[in-house]
Image: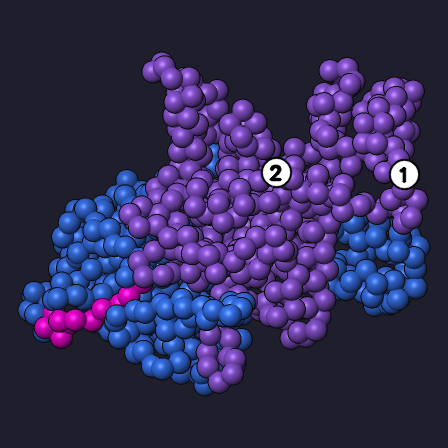
Chain colours: A purple, B blue
Amino acid sequence: MEIWRLPISASQRGKLISAGYTSLSSLSSISSSDLARELKVSETEAMDILKVALHSRGAQTSNASCSIVEGAQSAWDMLHDEESLMHITTSSADLDSILGGGIHCKEVTEIGGVPGIGKTQLGIQIAVNVQIPHDFGGLGGKAIYIDTEGSFMVERAFQIAEACIEDMSEYNRFLRKDFQECKINMKPEDILENIFYFRICSYTEQIALINYLDKFISEHKDVKLVVVDSVTFHFRQDFDDMALRTRVLTGMALKLMNLAKKFSLAVVLLNQATIKHTEGSFQLALALGDSWSHTCTNRIVLYWNGNERYAYIDKSPSLRSASAAYSVTVRGIRNSSSSCKRIKMM
Amino acid sequence: MANKLISEIPLPKSIANVFAARNISTAKEALSLTEFELMELLDVGLTEVRSALSQISEIVAPPYQTALSLMEQRFQKEHLGGHFPTGLKGLDAALCGGIPFGVLTELVGPAGIGKTQLCLKLSLLASLPTNYGGLDGRVIYIDVESKFSSRRLLEIGLRSFPEIFQMKAMAQEMAGRILVLRPTSLSEFTQSLEQIKVSLLQNQVKMLVIDSMAALVSGEHEQGIRRQQTLSWHISFIKSLAEFSRIPVVVTNQVRSHNHDDASRYSFQVQSRDVTMEIPMRYDSHLIAALGIHWAHAVTTRLVLEAKSGQRFIKVAKSPISPPLAFPFHITSSGISLLSDYGMELMGPEINAIHCQGHNEIINFGMEGLQ
C-alpha cells in the first residue's frame, strides 16, 4: 500500500513524500520523534501518522516478523516492495523488456563492454530518463554522474535531453489525440541542471566520494540515480597489492548497495572489458576480476553481434538470461532499426 | 586532493592523534583501509571510525557541478565550447566543433597513411592566432620516430595561409611556437612529461601532440602484463594532464597485424549455462590498432586513417558525440584535405576495422602528387 492511499490529510501526505517516504515499509522502523523531526510536525501528529500506517499494514503481521528478528521483513511484505519497484527506462523498448521494465531502483547494475560500444551513451541516456516526470511514467528524479575518465560530453547530454523532451511532446500529442502544439514546460537546460556531475581523478577521491554520497543524497532527496563511469579506470593501475584492491572494491560495492536500498535509487556502474587468459585461450571479460563480478546484483554485457549492438543479461537474481539489440542514434539509445529484431532467450 | 594530510582535516583531537601515532598521515592511506581494518589498527570503536571516515571523505571528495553549469562554463571560457577545429569541415561538423579539449584523441592507421601529416597540420593550426582559427599558443610536439619535418611544416603553412607565412618574421613566430621534443627512451619521455605538466599553464601551451605512442612502448618491454603496467601509468598521467589543463591532446598509434591471440577474435566470457554463448566478433581486416584494449578504453576519440580500394579514409571510430562516419581524404601540398564533407555512415564494428588495400599504390602515387 503506498502512502497516497493512506487516510491522512493531503498536507501530511505531501510532507511524507517530500521527505522521501514513499512506501509503508519505510515507516515501519522509524520512531515517532524521528518522524516528527523529519517532517517538521508535532510529535502527536507523527504518532498519528505512524498509527495509521501500522494499522493499514495489518498490525499483526508486522509485529510478528519484527518480534522474531529485529529489522527483518517477511518475504510476503517484500513481495509487495518488489512489485512496486520503480524502473528507469533506457529509451529502447527491447532493452527495457529484457530488463523487466528498465534499470531497477534499489539495486546495483553493472554494465560493461568493449570500447566504443555505447556504455557512456547508455549512462547519459539513463541520467536523462530518470528525470522523466511522473505523468509520463518516469521517476521525476535527479541524477548523479560520477565521471572517472572524462568521457561525459555536455553537448551529447544536451542532444539526448532535447530528443527526450521531443519524444515526450510527441507522446503527449498522441495521447490527447489533437494536433495542437502540446508544450511541455521542460527545456534541455532544466534536464542538465538536474544532473550532478562529479569528476574523479584518483581512486582515493572515488572512495571518498562514495562515502560522502550518503550525506549528499540525504540533502538532495530527489536523487534517484547514481552513475559511475567507469568504476574501473582508477583501479586498473597503481594497485600493486591485489588483495587490497579487492577489499577496497568490495567495500565500495557494499556502500553503493546500501545507498541503493536506503534511498531507493538505482546505481549503475560502467565497467571496461579486458583480456583474460582462461583454459589456454584468451577471452574478453569485464575488468576488476572474479571477486568483483560477485558483488554487483545485476550484470549486463554489451557486445557487437554482426553489425548490431547487443546487450546480454549476464547475471540477475530476477531476470532471465536474454539478449536484445539496441542502437546508438543521434537522439540517444533507441531500438535497433533492423527489421528482424531478435530478443533471444537463453 | 588524494594526498591531503590528515593533520589538515578538522577531526576531533583524540582520533587525529591516533591516526598520527599509527603513521597514517594522508587521506589516501586512511581511505584505502576498510572500516574493520581501521578499527583494529587504531583500536577505536566503529562509530568513531565511521565519523572520522565520513569527515575525511567529505573533505577529499571533489565538489559537484550541475551539467548545466559545466556547459555554460565551457562555452564562456573556452574556444568554441572546448573544441579545436581541424579545418576539415566535415570532420569538425561531426565532432561538434573539432577535437575536444581535455581528453585524448587518437590517430591510428598503417604506416604512411598520413598521421604525421595531420599532426603537422594541427600543430600549425594551433599556433595561429584565433582569427585564423588557431589557439594562439604554443604546441609541444613529442616526436619519437624523428618524423617531424620543419620544411614540410612551413610548406603547409605557405600553401594554406600564404598571407601569414610569406612574411619571414611571421613564419618564424609561428614556427617558433612549436616545440619539438625527441625522447630516445621511455624514461626520457616520462621525465619530459613530468616537466611539461609543471610548465604547461604558465607557458601558454595550447596543444600536446605525441607521435607516436606505440613506438615508445614497443622498444622497451616484452608483450603482455609488464607492458600493460608501464603503459597504465602513462595513460593515467597523460589523461590527467589533458584534464587539468583543458588542452587537446593528439596521440598517434601504429597498427599491427592480426595473429591468433587477438582481441578482435575473442568472444565474451559469460556465465553460459547449458548453451555455449556464441558471440563472435570478426573483423575482416588484417590490421588492428596497437597498444591493446586498455588504451582503446582510455582514448575518448579514435580517428582511424585507412586505405581502401586505393582511396584514403579518415573514420570516426569512437566518439561520444559523432556517429560512425568515414570521410575520404587526400594529402596535398597544403596538408590533408577532405574530398567530401559528407561522411559515409558505416554500420557495426566495420568502423573499427583498419584496411590497407591499395596502399602501396598510394604511397608511390602520393609522392608525385606532393610535388
Image location (x, y in percent) of residue A38: 82, 28
Label 2: state its secondary structure. loop
- Residue numbers of the magenta segment: B352-362
Mark nearer the viewer, 1 or 2: 1
Q: Is residue B250 above or below residue A329?
A: below
Given residues B91 and B241, the one toward you in this image is B91
Residue displayed at 38% across by 77% down:
B262
Residue occupied by mark 1? A63
Which chain contains the residue that carries disc 2? A
Neighbourhood count class around disc 1 (C-alpha, 10 Å): few under 14, some 14–19, many 20 upward? few
Q: Is residue A25 above or below residue B186?
A: above
Image location (x, y in percent) of residue A251: 73, 60
Residue occupied by mark 2? A86
Tell me the quadrant of the picture where the N terminus of chain B can be found.
Answer: bottom right
**Magenta stretch encompasses residue A228:** no
Given residues B125 and B331, the one toward you in this image is B331
Neighbourhood count class around disc 2 (C-alpha, 10 Å): few under 14, some 14–19, many 20 upward? many
**Magenta stretch encompasses residue B355:** yes
Residue displayed at 17% across by 65% down:
B308
Which chain contains the residue that carries disc 1? A
Residue kind at label 1, given as amino acid type: Asn
| Image side of residue B16 versus residue B145, left or right | right
Is residue A70 in view from this perspective? Answer: yes
